[in-house]
Image (cartoon, grey):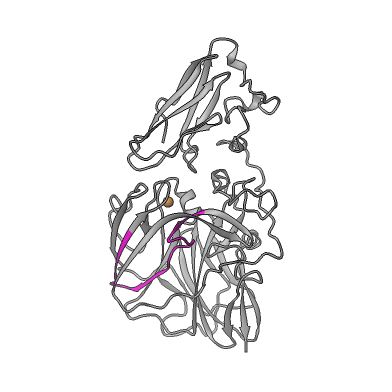
Amino acid sequence: MRFEPATVEVPLGDRLVVELTNTDPTNVHDLQLFDERTPRLATGESATLDVGVVTGPTQGWCTIVGHRQMGMVLDVVVTGGDAAGGNVASGADGAADGAQAGEGPAAHGSDAAGGAPGAGTAYPAPATPAIDPDARVQDVVDPVLPPLPEERVHRLTLTAEEVELEVAPGITQTRWTFNGRAPGPTLRGRVGDVFEITLVNDGTMGHSIDFHAGALAPDRPMRTIAPGESLEYRFTAERAGIWMYHCSTMPMSAHIAAGMHGAVVIEPEEGLPEVDREYLLVQSEVYLEPGTGGSGSADASGPAEVDMDAIAAERPAFVTFNGIANQYGTAGRMLDARVGERVRIWVLDAGPSRPSSFHVVGGQFDRTYLEGAWTLGDADGPAQDAGAQTLGLQAAQGGFVELTFPEAGHYPLVSHIMVDAERGAHGYVRVTD
Ligand SMILES: [Cu+2]
């Protein structure tokens, strides 16, 4: 992605007026330059940006998450005078020091994004907002796996929407979603089932969808569509497993991290062994832009945005099960089971980047299934004298574990990659007699 031309030369003291036209066939773009910003432009749209008299060099960029990192920067080079070593003379003083010249946007005013480090810059410790100990999750995502539907042809509309959602108790982010939730709806079917999906883009930027559960040429069904457009995506589920789906618009890391992911559970034709309870946990990371709102603090100005620099540095503020840190703990609602019941927990690692090592503290798995294969026990029964302590998943892998609980109590669910458990990939099963 780029601006053409990527550099403009302006004689010192001249007024700069930029005429921006979006010729990208699929993506929405804009231009931020000095304190001015164009509206988001759809394909074919144009806007004029009058930034006034230029007094020093600067860099503009597209504000849509990830586009700046993918190359959408516009260098304004000043000619004449002694502009070469200068900064803008706009009242900003030491803040716009020489080290920053030509790197971030010059300090013509004080744009918050000016502090965002560029590629190759050491990234500071993530500004994980503190969770208020009294905050509760307002809208806990139901962890129960929906039942297997009767029909063999599944028709569903998925709408790409950008909405404010909780990502931790009391903390919200502008999430990019399928149908207003992150993760998106869970689809469930059997080998041989047909899925007829309509994707509608109700967002403010390009979005798309990629279902791992079906094999097909990606060219058309996985294409990015502009706001207001829709597409049909039809696939047949030929193989059992828990399959990820996600938006595949670039940068994919941002679209997945922002919430555009979900699970498709495909059972073998003959079904899976009966169990007493079935849960589904989708692990994913949340990256919050430092200094944005939603932290619950008095000066919070609104929901946090997705932070592309934190994504690139793999420094999540939170790691979640089903999109909200710690929602299955005391701030939300625990999973339930009774002593002796057989419980199956499906786990999908949606990433975008971090693996999971799924563990139940105090529990032992006697049947596990990873990426389409039994890895402990099988359809005829659980293992009798062997067990497993974790289900290890790389990004986009999935499977399930089964266990029974020997006595009443509170059994923590964690990613045993402990730093991620401490970032919120933590909950409980409350076991009662
Ligand atoms: Cu998207």
Give the extent of the magenta segment.
175-198
> How far from the left and from the top, in percent, is residue 12?
54, 14
**Nearer to me, 353 or 97:** 97
- Residue 66 in the image: above or below residue 361: above
Q: Is residue 188 magenta?
A: yes
> How far from the left and from the top, in percent, is residue 238?
30, 68
Q: Quadrant of the C terminus?
A: bottom right
Left or right of 397, for residue 416: right
The residue at 45%/85% (across/down) is 381
Q: Is residue 217 magenta?
A: no
**Nearer to me, 98 or 93:** 93
> How far from the left and from the top, in percent, is residue 206?
39, 47
As drawn, the residue found furthest toward the top would be 81
Q: What is the number of callouts on the image?
A: 0
Q: Can residue 195 be seen? A: yes
Q: Can residue 352 be seen? A: no
Q: Quadrant of the N terminus?
A: top left
Left or right of 220, for residue 394: right
> How far from the left and from the top, in percent, is residue 173?
56, 54
The residue at 65%/59% (across/down) is 419
Left or right of 263, for residue 173: right
- Residue 98 in the image: above or below residue 420: above
The residue at 67%/53% (across/down) is 129
The residue at 28%/74% (across/down) is 152
